[in-house]
Amino acid sequence: MPATARKPDASRRSERSRRAILDAALDQVGETGYEKLTIEGIAARAGVGKQTIYRWWPSKAAVLLDAFTAVSEDAAQGQHELPDTGDLEADLKEVLRATVDELNRDVYDRPARALAAAAVTDPALAEEFNRRVLGPQLDLYVERFTAARAAGHIADDVDVRVATDLLVGPLAHRWLLRTLPMDHAYADRVVELALRGIAA
Amino acid sequence: MPATARKPDASRRSERSRRAILDAALDQVGETGYEKLTIEGIAARAGVGKQTIYRWWPSKAAVLLDAFTAVSEDAAQGQHELPDTGDLEADLKEVLRATVDELNRDVYDRPARALAAAAVTDPALAEEFNRRVLGPQLDLYVERFTAARAAGHIADDVDVRVATDLLVGPLAHRWLLRTLPMDHAYADRVVELALRGIAA
DNA sequence: CCGTTGACAAGACGGTCCGTCTCGTCGCAC
DNA sequence: GTGCGACGAGACGGACCGTCTTGTCAACGG
C-alpha cells in the first residue's frame, strides 16, 4: 500500500510514437513559438493519444528538452572538443562565430530559446538543461582553456571556468535579452577583449 | 470606419485601482511564482474587475513590468551613477557585489526573473524591458567606463559597451540559467579577470 | 498456439483561466 | 446637477489542462 505510482513498462514503449512526439514538438515550436506549444497540439500533430505523452514526460518543457537534445547532438556533429591550432584567439573566434550563426537559425533558436525561458523560472528544468545540454558545451571551453594554460598561452592563476563565463556570458546575454544585435563582429570583440582585458 | 480601437480616457483613470493592481501582481509573483500569476488572480486580490486590467495593460507581463519598474527605481535609491573613487576595480566589485545581493533577495529575484523569462520569448516585451529597466542600468556602466578611459585607467581602444557586457554577461548567465552559484567571490573574480584579461 | 498483459489512439470529462461582454454604480468634468 | 465613462462584479464561450475510460493490438509466457 505504499503509494507506489506504478511506472510504465519501458520495454513495451513504442519507438514510433516517441519519435513522432519529439518531431511534432520541434515542428510546432519552430512554427508557432513556445507560447502556442500545447500538449494537445503535439498529440494531435503526432497522431498520438494525450495519455502517451503524459505517461512518459512530466511537462511539455521536458518533451522539448528531449527533442532539443537530439538536435543539439546533431549540431555537434560528433565534435567532442574545440579546435586547437595553437592560436587560442583564432580558435575561439571561429567557435563563437559558429555559435552566433547557429543561434541565428530559427530551427535552432526557437526551441533553444523556449527551453532557456522555461529554465529561468523552473529550477528543476534548469538543472536538467545544464546537465544534458549546456554543461557539456561549457566543458569544451574549460578543456580548451586548460590546454591553453598548459601551453603557457594564458596566465597560470586564471580560473578556467570563470574564463569560460567571460566568453559565453556576453553572448548569451545579448541572445536571450536582445539588448543589442549579435553578429560576428561582436563575437570577435568579445574574444579580443576577454583575452587581453579591459584595463590599460 | 477606420477600425479605431477607441482608447480609454486616461484622465479619468483610478489611481487607487492602478496601485492595487501593481501591488497585487508583485505580491502574487513573489508568493507563488510567475506560472501561477493569473489575471483573474490579480484582479481578485486587488479587489478590481478584470476589465480594468485589460483596459490599461496588454498582458500580464506588461503589468509586471510596470510593477517592477517602480521596485527597480526604489532600489536605485536615486543613485543615477556608479561610484567613482578613482579605483575602478574596487568600484566595480562593490557594484557587482550589491547586484548579487539584490538578485539573491526573493522580493527582487522573483519578479525580475519572471520578466526576464517572458522577455526571452517575447521580443516586444524585451524591447520595453530593455528601454525601461535594463538599458538605463547598463548605461551606468558605460558612463563609468567612459570616465575611466578619460582618466587613462582603461585602454583607449576599448569599446565601453562590450566592456559592460563582459562584466554583466557572466553574472546574468549564472543568475538566469543557474549554471553555478553566484556569490561575492564570483563577482570579484569576474571583475578581476575582465579587467586584466585571460591571456598571459 | 492461445491467453494475458499493458501500451496504444481516441476522446469524454470537470476544472481553470482566458479575453470579451454586459450589467448597475459611482465619481469626476463641465 | 447632469451626463459620460471608468469602475466592480461576474456571466459567457472557448482553449487547454491533467485524469480517466474504452476498445484495439502486439509482445510475451505458458
Image: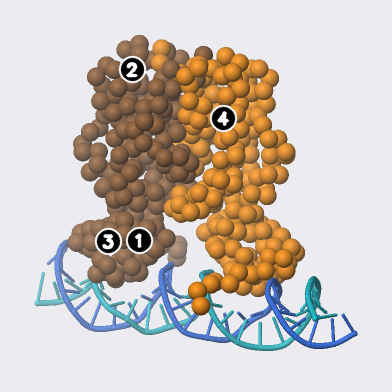
Chain colours: A orange, B brown, C blue, D cyan
Residue at image location 25% in from the left, 66% down from the top: B46
Chain letter of disc 1 in the image: B
| Amino acid found under the numbered disc labelled 2 | Ala
Residue at image location 71% in from the left, 44% down from the top: A74
Residues under labels 3 and 2: Cα distance?
Answer: 42 Å
Residues under labels 3 and 1: Cα distance?
Answer: 12 Å
Q: Which residue is mark 4?
A: A142
User: Judging from the image, what secondary structure is the residue with disc 3 in?
Assistant: helix
Chain letter of disc 2 in the image: B
The answer to which quarter of the image holds residue A100 is: top right
Percent x, y of residue B27: 28, 58
Percent x, y of residue B176: 44, 44
Label 1 neighbourhood size at 10 Å, few (<14), some (14-19), many (20+)?
few
Residues under labels 2 and 1: Cα distance?
Answer: 43 Å
- Tell us which disc is closer to us: 3 or 1: 1
Label 3 neighbourhood size at 10 Å, few (<14), some (14-19), many (20+)?
many
| Amino acid found under the numbered disc labelled 3 | Ala
| Marks 3 and 2 close (CB-CB < 8 Å) | no
Q: Which residue is mark 1?
A: B32
Q: Nearer the viewer, residue A178 or A190?
A: A190
**Number of the label disc, if any, that sits on residue B24:** 3
Q: Which residue is mark 2?
A: B148
- Tell us which disc is closer to us: 1 or 4: 4
Residues under labels 1 and 4: Cα distance?
Answer: 37 Å
Of pointers 2 and 1, the one earlier in the residue sequence:
1
Of pointers 3 and 2, the one earlier in the residue sequence:
3
